[in-house]
Image: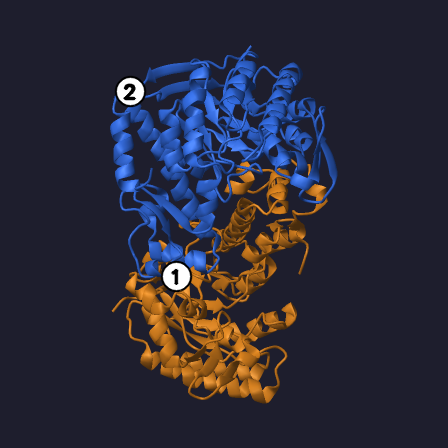
Chain colours: A orange, B blue
Amino acid sequence: MVSFKFELIKEDKKTKARVGRFHTPHGIIETPIFMPVGTQANVKSLSPEELKEIGAQIILSNTYHLYLRPGHILVEEAGGLHKFMNWDRPILTDSGGFQVFSLGDLRTVKEDGVEFRSHIDGSKHFFSPEKVMEIENALGADIIMAFDECVPYPCDYEYALSALRRTTRWAERCKAAHKREDQALFGIIQGSTFRDLREQSAREITALDFPGYAIGGLSVGEPAEIMYEVLDYLTPLMPKDKPRYLMGVGAPDNVVEGVMRGVDMFDCVLPTRIARNGTVLTKKGKLVIRNATYARDFGPLDEECGCYTCRNYSRAYIRHLLKANEILGLRLTTIHNLHFLLTLVKEIREAILEDRFLEFREEFYEHYGKI
Amino acid sequence: MVSFKFELIKEDKKTKARVGRFHTPHGIIETPIFMPVGTQANVKSLSPEELKEIGAQIILSNTYHLYLRPGHILVEEAGGLHKFMNWDRPILTDSGGFQVFSLGDLRTVKEDGVEFRSHIDGSKHFFSPEKVMEIENALGADIIMAFDECVPYPCDYEYALSALRRTTRWAERCKAAHKREDQALFGIIQGSTFRDLREQSAREITALDFPGYAIGGLSVGEPAEIMYEVLDYLTPLMPKDKPRYLMGVGAPDNVVEGVMRGVDMFDCVLPTRIARNGTVLTKKGKLVIRNATYARDFGPLDEECGCYTCRNYSRAYIRHLLKANEILGLRLTTIHNLHFLLTLVKEIREAILEDRFLEFREEFYEHYGKI
């Protein structure tokens, strides 16, 4: 049996922040970590070499999308997702739960699973816990997620309760159906923003003894303060010796706050999506590089940044590329934004190791200007 | 004064093919060469590092496009085109002649120059030989092209005559207006497909003593045989000791035939444009990689190819990326197609140097299957 050991290297004395190492068949993930999202077996616009230069240790890919196109069987025939996409470091696949529940009118939830229509061609499909395990086993990621019922925000108590109960029943079925020892199956805690429901879900899911646990159903529209409040009471209920993954969260300030509350793993499309729209992240906040004010600005996106983009190109050139719809423009802003997030978690890890996480956090907000 | 020496290294004994070296301020160009097109200060989707790995020695950029966006003054302020786009090897800028004459109803030709409307916002502009030299001087390419009147195919004799005469008068004005000694101004021979007009244009333009000469007005819709016929009688009228550039030509078979007829330089959007549409070039001809037949083909685009794409990715993955509108798909096919063209001209140079150009050509057609 492959070991998915989580080494807890260091715990911050003043906060719940911690540094760890999660061992997977494709390498060690140093936590806290941010995972770039490669929805369709590619982090949009980038090559694997570029991701490595940026410092990506693990990427996330989406089961729902890969199941529909090109199909999990095809990926399996190709030798699995790593080989198919030429990425030899760890991969995490989500369960498609968030996607199918986001389909709204296009899906019907039953106890057995969810019937839904493809967003591509309208064809009918069915995801059950067993089916999702079959798909994720075929894709072959290092970490796979259980199929859960994800509720929107706001959500009434009864619905949140029924969803968390189903999530537990589905987690049991996922555990029973999961077939590969070289993949770590993570359970997902639901319960919306109700403290007793989150506590119940944490109890039920952790009782199933997964090698890692995710917090689902946050960053779905609730104010950041409510998300932080949930984290405050939830992470102490999660095992210390297992990685904690806050799903879909990746704004720089949310990452800092998540780490402070004991979260180890993050993912989010935000840095890559805003990059393609011409917005870049810097320690001094966001910069809308498409703005006319940067037309003749021949300095780098961020003076302090050492990424490929900032070493070689000016704001004026990047703005020109974006205005002219040149693909290289998106590549350069995507590289910069992912580098920003991966440098942020690296600096966070260093700060925790050097007992200065709170100072780091304070300094971060001094420039980034938000809390 | 900067020397733009053209060394004629070797002339083929059986054909007009030749190998040369053209010295420019940003390095030596080994001819015959293919120049990737970077219309808007970027070869679509690629980074300079990727272009270098592919073997690009010189790229072409378009004066018309750069004048409109971001503007030649801005590029000059950025330190010139090389610095602006982070490319330290030679660049050639065209004159915008082909683009403004292609605008049809959007332009009015006068003796002084051409009035036209921007394809971007409809704004009014005026290109004269002097204005084009001002723009190209500001952009700062190593090789710049004279402003010419480019006629379509077919074209009546009178129009072709008047255009070639104007092209000569404009070439004189370009020569007088050109201000930078570190840029080589090339003259352009017009005359459509009329032998006496081509001869007249060649006489008039070469009399002006440029450091290089281009053949304009070909590959504008005429059958390839007619293009080859023009080359047959035209290149012997062009000086042996100056590079000869066949504008807008770059289909693999056209390159082989052009070289055989004494051409040294080629450029074309074809390899990059068809790449973005999912068609790739191989020694066995074109492959429409979007076709369903490649969905489960886990081999490389071309078994014999050593490019980054073929070393790392399967047809199935590239097809998936293209079908899913993933930018990396275009990058991979663009890399492959440019690598194909640049490998082709490299092999051509080697074949000429080793006195086996005709054998190379025969072998090329044996697989490529066309002539």
Q: Is residue B262 above or below residue A57?
A: above
Near-viewer residue (B185 or A110): B185
Chain bearing mark 1: A
Q: Amino acid at mark 2?
A: Lys
Q: Is residue B319 above or below residue B91?
A: below
Mark 1 neighbour density, 10 Å: few (under 14) some (14–19) many (20 or more): many
Q: Amino acid at mark 1?
A: Ile
2 and 1 marks on the same chain = no
Task: Please name the residue that numbered disc 1 is placed on.
Answer: A91
Near-viewer residue (B188 or B138): B188
Task: Please name the residue that numbered disc 2 is placed on.
Answer: B14
Determine the secondary structure under disc 1: strand
Query: Would you say residue B22 is visible in this rendering?
Result: yes
Look at discs 2 and 1 and give the one toward the viewer.
Answer: 2
- For residue B76, what is the image quadrant? top right
Query: Would you say residue B210 is visible in this rendering?
Result: no
Near-viewer residue (B248 or B69): B248
> Which residue is painted at 46% across and 16% down in the image?
B237
